[in-house]
Amino acid sequence: MLSTNNNILRLALKLPDKYLTKFIPFTARRKKLSTMAANLKFNDRVVVVTGAGAGLGRAYALLFAERGASVVVNDLGGSRDGAGKSSNAADIVVNEIKSKGGKAVADYNSVVDGDKIIQTALENFGRVDVVVNNAGILRDKSFARISDTDWNLIFDVHVKGSFKTTQAAWPHFKKQNFGRIIMTSSAAGLYGNFGQANYSAAKMALVGLSNTLAIEGAKNNIHCNVIVPTAASRLTEDILPPDFFAELKPELIAPVVVWLCHESCDENGSIIDSAVGWASKCQIVRSKGSIIRHSIADKVTPESVQNNWRVITNMDKACNPGSIQEATAGLMEHLETMKNHADPNTPKNIEESSFSFTARDAILYALGVGATVRNGDDLRFLYEGHEDFSPLPTFAVIPGMVGIMNSDVITSAIPGKTIELSSILHGEQYLELYKPIPASGELNSVIHVADVLDKGKGAVILCNVETFDERGEKVAFCQTSAFAVGCGGFGGKRTSDKSIATFDAPSREPDTVAIAKTSADQAALYRLSGDFNPLHIDPQFAAIGGYSEPILHGLCSLGFSVRHVLAQYGGNDVANFKALKARFSKPVTPGETLKTAMWRSGNRVHFQTSVVESGNVVLSGAYVDFHKIVASDIVQKLLSSSELQSETIFSAMSEQVNANLDKVKKINGVFLYVITKNGQAAGKWTLDLKKGKVYKGEPESGVKADTTLTCDDDVMVDIATSKLNPQVAFMKGKLKIKGNIMLTQKLKDLMNAQSKL
C-alpha cells in the first residue's frame, strides 16, 4: 500500500504511481523528495510583500523567509477600511522570521508610496527580485451609496498601490534580467459581488494591469501573474461563516504564490485561483461567434443580431485568444470572409424555426415509426397518461427537419445553382440529445449550412441544427447530410472536417436481431409528423425522382431501427439515449420488412438495417451511443454465452484506431494483449500502432510485440469502461505488463476514447 504522501512522492519522481513502490526503494524516494524541496529555494533573493502584517501577507512572508529569501515586510498597520496606522503588525512578523533564523526588515509606508517600499529593500539588502502586491482594504457599500472617498481609497490601495510599488521595482528587474510580480485579484473581481462595486472594479483592473506587464516584461525575464485567493483574513473574518472561515488557511495558498515567484517557474500572464489546498487556472474566453453580415455591402440590424443571438452566445466551442494580436487576427479573417462574400462557418444565412407540439404529435410520430400497443413496452410512447410517457429520442430530429423544409436553407446553399426538391436525397443523419425531450411545448431551432461539398455528379450539403427549449437550454444537436443530385461540378472541396463520421459494424455475427414489417401506409402516416416532401406520397413526383412508386422517408426507417436498439439495449428509457449516426444507403418501399442487426461495443451499439424481401442494406455505418446500457433479457443471455466479453472492446478499439490513424501511429508501438479466463489464456489480440491495425491473435510474421499485457477478461472490460484504473490494476497484480512498460502510458488517450463509448 502507498503512504498518505503518495501524491507528493509521485510529483517528486514525476512517475505514475503504478511504478512508485515497485521500482523505487522507500529510502531513495525520501531522498528524492528532499532534493526536490531543496531545489525551490530563494537564497540571495529579496522579496517585497505588501500588507504582510497578517493573513495572507504574513503567510507569504514566512514561507519566503523559510526558503532563504530576505523579506521586506510592508504593512501600514491600519484597520480593514484603511483608517489608522501602526508599526506593530509589521514588527511582529519580522521578529517571527528572525526568531527562526530568517532575514527580514519592516516597512511602514503606504503602498501609494511604493517607491519608498522598494527603497527599503535596496537600502537593507541591495536589490529586489520579487514583489507580491497583497495590501488591501474594504469599503463595502451598495453601488448607489458609494461615495467618491470610498471609491478613491479602494483604487488607491489596490490599483495605484500595486502600480507604484511595481513601477519602482521595474528598472531593477530589467537591469538584472529577472523579476517576479504577483497581483492580487478576487472572486469579486472575476464574478462580481453585491456591495463591492468599488472593490470588484479595482480587482478586475489588476488583471488587465498584469496582462500588460506580462507582455512588456517577458523579454527581460520579468513574469507577472494574478493570484485569486480565498483565505481567512481580517478582510473576511466577519463576512464568512465561522466553520468555512476556519478552513480557509492562508498557509494553504502561500505555496502557490511562492512557486509562481520561483526562477524555475515559467508561468506568465496567468490568473490562478486558490483556496483550501486547491488551485486552478482561470481564463477569459469568447465564443466561436457568428458573422452577422455576410458581405461588406450588408448592413447590421438589430434583427440580424437577434436572429444570430443563440450562435453568438453559444459557448460550446469557446476559446481563449492568447493575445490581442490573436484576437484581432480572428476579426481580420471575418472581414476577409465578408469581402469574399463567403462565411466558412455558415455559408448561407442562418434560419430560425419554432416548433410547437403536444403529446398528440409525439404519439403520432411514435405510430409513424412502428410503435404499437401490441408491444406493452411501447405504451410509454403512445399513451399520454403513462407514468413514463415521453417522445421517442428520434422525435428530436423533427423540429429541425420542419425548419429545413419550410426554408430555402438547403435549396439555395450553392450560389448560382437552383436545387430542386425532387433532386435532394437524405444522405446521413446525426442526432445528439442533451436532455430528454419534453412531453409538449415549444422548441426553437437554429439552422445553418455548415459546409457544401462538390462530389462531381452531385453536391453534399451539411446542415447543422441546434434545438433549444422554452428556457433557452439546448435540447438537441442534429447534422443532416443532404445529397443534391446533378448539382456538383462547381469547383468546391470534396471533404469537410465538419462532417460527423459513420462507423462500419464489426465483422462478426450480430449480437441480436429485430424484425418489423412496415405498413403500405407507413409513409402516409409518417409524413403527418412534418416531412411533407411529395416524393413520399405522390406517384408522379416520385417518378420525376426516378422511383417507380413513392418511397419511405429515410428518417422513418431510422426511427424503426432506433426503437429496436433502444428496446434491446436502453431499457426503452429515453434518458439512457445519448446520440446516433446513420448513413441512408438505399430506399425502402412502404410495406417492406426491416431487419435491424445489432452489435454491442461498450456503451455503443452498432446497427445495420436491411430489407428482408430484397436483402438490400438500407442503413449502414450506423450506431447509437448510450449513457447507460440496460440490455434486455434476450440480449443478456446472448452476451453471457459469448466466450469473451472483451471481444467487443477490441472491436471498438479498432474503430478508434481507424478513426485516428495519424494520432495512434505517433505511439509507434506494438502491444500484445493476452486475455485469460479462469486462470487460462483464452484469447490474444494485437494492437499494431506502428501500422494502425488491431487484429485477433499474435503479431503477424516479422512483427515483434514491444509490450505484452496480460489480464482477465472481466478486468479488461472494467478497465475499458473506466470501472478500474489501469494503474490500480497493475499495482494489485490484476494487470501484468512485460517489455517496454513506459510505452503503455501512450495508450492513455486511446483507452480514454474507448471508455466514452
Image (cartoon, helix red, strand yellow):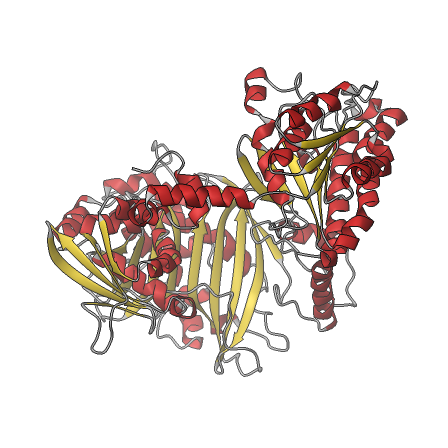
Q: How many numbered callouts?
A: 0
Up/down of 663 relative to 288, above or below: below
- Is residue 550 visible in the rendered image? The answer is no
Residue 83 place in picture, x, y as percent: 83, 19
Left or right of residue 576: residue 279:
right
The residue at the point 42 percent across, 40 percent down is: 7
In the image shown, does 738 or 422 lie closer to the viewer? 738
The residue at the point 56 percent across, 59 percent down is: 406
Return the residue found at the far front: 101
- Is residue 107 visible in the rendered image? The answer is yes
Left or right of residue 249: residue 140:
right
In the image shown, does 336 or 430 lie closer to the viewer? 336
In the image shown, does 91 or 448 lie closer to the viewer? 91
Residue 384 place in picture, x, y as percent: 38, 35
Left or right of residue 483: residue 172:
right
Return the residue found at the far right: 148
In the image shown, does 681 or 334 lie closer to the viewer? 681
Up/down of 539 relative to 288, above or below: below
Residue 346 place in picture, x, y as percent: 61, 64
Residue 1 place in picture, x, y as percent: 29, 37
The residue at the point 13 percent across, 55 percent down is: 643
Up/down of 135 relative to 649, above or below: above
